[in-house]
Amino acid sequence: MSDPVFWQTLRLTLEVSLVTTLILLLLGLPLGWVLAHKRFWGKRVLESVVLLPLTLPPTVLGFYLLLLMGQNGPIAQTLGFTWAFRFEGLVVGSVLFSLPFALNGYREAFRGLELDLIQTARTLGAGWRRVWLEVILPITWPGILSGTILAFAHTLGEFGVVLMVGGSIPGKTQMVSIYIYDQVQALQFGRASEAAAVLLGVSFALVYLVRTLEDEWRSRMPSSTR
Amino acid sequence: MEIAYALEHPVKLQLKLRVQGFTVLLGESGVGKTSFLKALAGLIFATGQPFGGLRAEHRPVGYLPQHFALFPHLRAWQNVAFPLAHLPPPQRKAQALAYLDQMGIAGLSEQFPRELSGGQQQRVALARALAREPKILLLDEPTSALDAATREEVFGGVLERLKSLQIPTLVASHDQWLAQRADWVGVLTRAGLVQQGTSEEVFTRPATLEVARLVGFRNLWEGTVVLLEGAWALVATPIGLLKAPRQAWVSLGQPIRLGVRPEEVFTLQGRENLIRGRVRHLRSQGLRIRGQLLIGEAVLDFLLPRYKQLQLDLHEGQWLEVALEPHCLHLIPAD
C-alpha cells in the first residue's frame, strides 16, 4: 500500500461508484416501478434497451459513449462540452453499464409487492406520498438496497467502459481495476496483488450483505399470498 | 343508499343498485363484482354517484379486498391506525385499540399479520376499514378466504357485529350462504343486474332462469300452463301436473319453467303435487342426504335431513312418493 497513486485511484473509484449509485437510485426506482407494474406500448423495447449492457461487450458501450461525448461528438457540437476523459464521463458510462443490475433488483422488489396493498392504502386516505413512504418503501427496502449494493459493487470493478471513456489517466480517471492491469503490465506484481486483495475483500463483503438482505426480504413477504 | 355506476374497463358494466343494511351483490366470478367495488372505491375509473369524480383517498369508503391486504410490516394496531394519521400519536393508538376491541380482537393488537389466522386478519382489516369512518363498507368475497367448514363460526360473529354497526355494507360474493343472511340482495350476471330484492324474495322467487340456478334451484323443468284458477296455475311438466302460485305475467298455454329447491322437497306430507319415483344417487352431505328421484325420464333433486333417511329407511332403487308443497314451487319465464 506504499503507492500514493493507489489511494488516489481507490478514492476516485469509490467516488464514481457512489455518485453512480445515487443516480441509479433516482433513475432506477421510477423505471423499476414502471417496468414492474405498468403496461404500455414499446415496453419490451425499453426493457431490452436497459438490459442491453448485460450482453454488450463493455468496450462497445464505451466506444459509443466516447463517440457521443468526445471532442467532435454530437454533444460537443450541439451543447458545447465534452465529458470524455473526465469524472462525468466515467459516471455516465458506469450508470448505463450498471443500470440492469440495479433495475433487476428494483423490479423484482416491486413485482413482489401486492397492488392490493397500495390500492387499500389509498382507500384508507393515503395520498401517493404516504403510499410510497409508509407502504411501498418499508416493504420493498431490502430488495431496493440489495439492487443498489449490487450496482455499487459492479461499478467498483468496472473495467472496459471506464477504460474507453476515461482513458486511465492516473489520479484523474484511473479506476482500481485498470490500476491493477497497469501494474501487471509494468510487472509490479506486489502492488497489483495488494490492490486486488482490497477489491476482493470489498466485493465479498458487499455480496454477502446482498444475500443477507435477500433472506430478510423473503421473510417479509406477506403470509396472505401463500 | 342508491348507487348508479357505469364503467367501461376491465368490464363494461352499468348498474343501479340499492344498498340497505347488509347487502350482497351475488354473481359468479368474472361478471364484474370486484370491478364494481373497486370503481366505488375510486380505484377504477367509472362515472356515477355517489362519490363520482373523487379520488380514492378522498372517498369515505371502507374497502376490504379478498385477501384483506394488511400491511405486513405493521402490527395489528398500527394497521388500524393507518387511516387515523390526522390524530396525535397517543390518541391514534387508543383509537386503534378501540376499533380492534369493537371487532373483539383487542388482545391481538401487537401481532403482525403473518402471525394471525385468516379470520383474525379479516377482523383486523375490518377494524382498519371502520377506522376510516366510512359511509359505506365494501367487502370483496369475504368468505372465500375462509375455510368452508368453519365459515359459519368465523364469519357469523363478524356478520353480527357488522349488522349492529348500522353502516351500509355492500358485499360482492358468490356465496349463497352469505346472500341468504343479507338484508338486500342484488344478482349480477353477464347481462347486468337482473334482480334485486330481499334475500327471501330472491331465493324463493328468482326472476330469471339464470338467477334461479345461481340461488340454488336445481330442479327446473320445462312446462306449459294448462289451467289458471284464482291464485294458482296448473302446469304440465315432465314429472306430472303440478300446482304452483300464479304469477301476474303467466297466461294460458304459455311455455314456462317450473322450479323447486331440493331442500323444499318434502316426503309424504300434504295431498297435492304427489310425485312417485325411484330413488338413486344417495349421498350424505354434512348432516343431510342429497339424492335424486327418477320419474320416467325426468329427475328430481332432493335434500333431506338425516333423520328422514332413518325414518324412511331410504335406500337406492326404492320407490318413494313425495309431495311438492305448491307454495314452494316457482314459475319462471322460459328463456
Image (spheres, coloured by chain):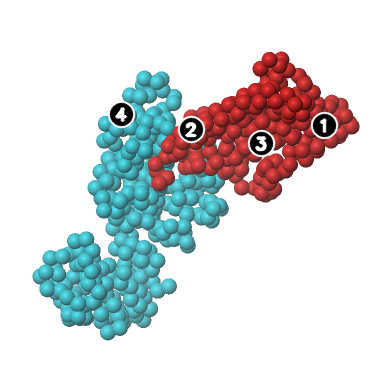
User: Label 4 near label 2: C-beta < 8 Å?
Assistant: no
User: Badge 4 is on which residue?
Assistant: B98
Say the numbered circle drawn on residue A99. Answer: 3
Note the chain letter of the red one.
Answer: A
C-alpha gap between disc 4 and disc 1: 63 Å
Left or right, B316 with respect to A50, comes to left
Instruction: Tell me if label 1 and label 2 are in contact, CB under 8 Å.
Output: no
- Dot 4: few (<14), some (14–19), or many (≥20) neighbours within 10 Å? some
What is the chain letter for disc 2? A
Q: Residues within 10 Å of mark 1 (few under 14, many from 20)?
A: many
Work out how far the residue at label 1 is from the one at label 2, CA to CA, in angstroms. Answer: 39 Å
Asked if the residue at tag 2 contacts the one at tag 3, i.e. Cβ–Cβ closer than 8 Å, the answer is: no
Residue type indicated by callout 4: Ala
Q: Are marks 4 and 3 on the same chain?
A: no
Label whose residue precedes the other's in the sequence (3 or 2): 3
Q: Quadrant of residue B107?
A: top left
